[in-house]
Image: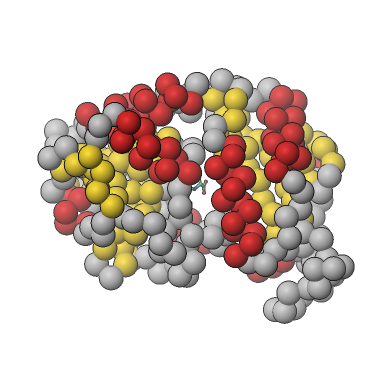
């Protein structure tokens, strides 16, 4: 695989980053995951805009322009022959060659930028989407700036492990009695034809797929309500689903062992997945 590090395209085995990089030592880094379908990047602009926002919120300099970023994405997709898969992008604050809590001087310390591709044949036609996934509820103990897409992913990783241990596929996070989002996706339920999801705030990541899917739902005359909701409401729903760049629209068929509807992917989730894939291709 060819990867990109700080201006260079290299074989992955030759790519190097300093051990003092703040991305490595302090998770002082932001990232984006953009999906590739039929060799084309999905919603690149949305991801580029959110990346800029994450960088701004952390007073981190942009490592390159949006056009350069697009060029790097396209080149990696091409040289690695990605038809279906993902492009991972990470920007960290870099390092001045030592460990310190105080940010290094931005005049002398450049951000580190790394990109690589992940080949995922069958991403659009995934068996999980045919069957639907199961989730469990766990407390949301993450920091309070979840709108910034940082690489602080230890708790989301632990959440996925808790789900795995419980025999489930993923976890939904609960704070103050309400569902925030999934470990790596935005969460929705459907009751009496109405789609319910949490409104945007610093409590959740502003999903690029969420935005696209909500626009598509509106265009398809589906009703969407943005409000706080509890896990008990979701358990009593007709159907549920999650959205992310890597899962698109993924039906959820059980929550904490409670089966939703007839235990198969719901009509609205299936329809939205179809529309999303059609429009993206
Ligand atoms: N995760 N919420 C969280 C906490 C996420 O990590 C993600 C994305 C989303 C969905 O955002 P988007 O639709 O822009 O992908 C919501 C990515 C895919 C990941 O960490 O791999």
Q: In this view, does 10 lie above or below 255?
A: above
The answer to which image quadrant residue 112 occupies is bottom right
Query: In the image, is 201 to the left or to the right of 188?
Result: right
Residue at 71 percent of width and 24 percent of height = 78
Q: How is the image coloured?
A: secondary structure
Residue at 66 percent of width and 46 percent of height = 89
Q: Residue 181 at x, y = what percent?
A: 36, 54
Query: In the image, is 33 to the left or to the right of 60?
Result: left
Q: Residue 82 at x, y = what percent?
A: 64, 25
Q: Is residue 132 visible?
A: no
Residue at 68 percent of width and 22 percent of height = 81
Residue at 54 percent of width and 35 percent of height = 43
Outermost residue toward the right in this view:
108
Query: In the image, is 198 to the left or to the right of 244?
Result: left
Q: Residue 83 at x, y = what percent?
A: 60, 22
Number of numbered discs present? 0
Q: In which quarter of the image is the N terminus?
A: top right
Q: Is residue 97 visible?
A: yes
Query: In the image, is 95 to the left or to the right of 216?
Result: right
Q: Is residue 198 above or below residue 240?
A: below
The answer to which image quadrant residue 103 occupies is bottom right
The answer to which image quadrant residue 104 occupies is bottom right
For the residue pair 36 and 49, the one nearer the viewer reads as: 49
Q: In this view, does 165 lie above or below 35?
A: below
Q: Residue 261 at x, y = what percent?
A: 14, 37
């Amino acid at each position: 695989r060819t990867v990109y590090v700080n201006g260079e395209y290299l074989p992955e085995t030759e790519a190097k980053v300093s051990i003092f990089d703040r991305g490595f030592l302090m998770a002082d880094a932001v990232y984006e995951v953009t999906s590739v379908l039929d060799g084309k990047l999905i919603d690149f602009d949305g991801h580029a805009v959110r990346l800029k926002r994450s960088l701004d919120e952390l007073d981190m300099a942009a490592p390159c322009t949006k056009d350069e970023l697009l060029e790097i994405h396209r080149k990696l997709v091409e040289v690695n022959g990605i038809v279906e898969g993902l492009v991972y992008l990470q920007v960290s604050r870099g390092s001045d060659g030592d460990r310190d809590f105080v940010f290094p001087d931005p005049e002398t310390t450049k951000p580190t930028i790394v990109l690589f591709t992940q080949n995922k044949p069958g991403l659009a036609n995934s068996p999980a989407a045919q069957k639907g996934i199961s989730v469990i509820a766990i407390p949301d103990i993450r920091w309070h700036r979840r709108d910034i897409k940082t690489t602080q992913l230890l708790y989301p990783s632990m959440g996925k492990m808790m789900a795995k241990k419980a025999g489930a596929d993923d976890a939904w996070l609960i704070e103050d009695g309400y569902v925030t989002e999934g470990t790596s996706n935005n969460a929705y339920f459907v009751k009496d034809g109405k789609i319910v999801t949490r409104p945007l705030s610093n409590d959740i990541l502003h999903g690029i797929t969420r935005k696209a899917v909500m626009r598509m739902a509106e265009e398809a005359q589906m009703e969407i309500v943005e409000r706080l909701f509890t896990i008990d409401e979701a358990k009593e729903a007709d159907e549920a689903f999650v959205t992310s760049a890597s899962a698109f629209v993924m039906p959820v068929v059980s929550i904490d062992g409670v089966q939703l509807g007839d235990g198969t992917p719901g009509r609205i989730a299936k329809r939205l997945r179809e529309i999303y894939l059609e429009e993206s291709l």
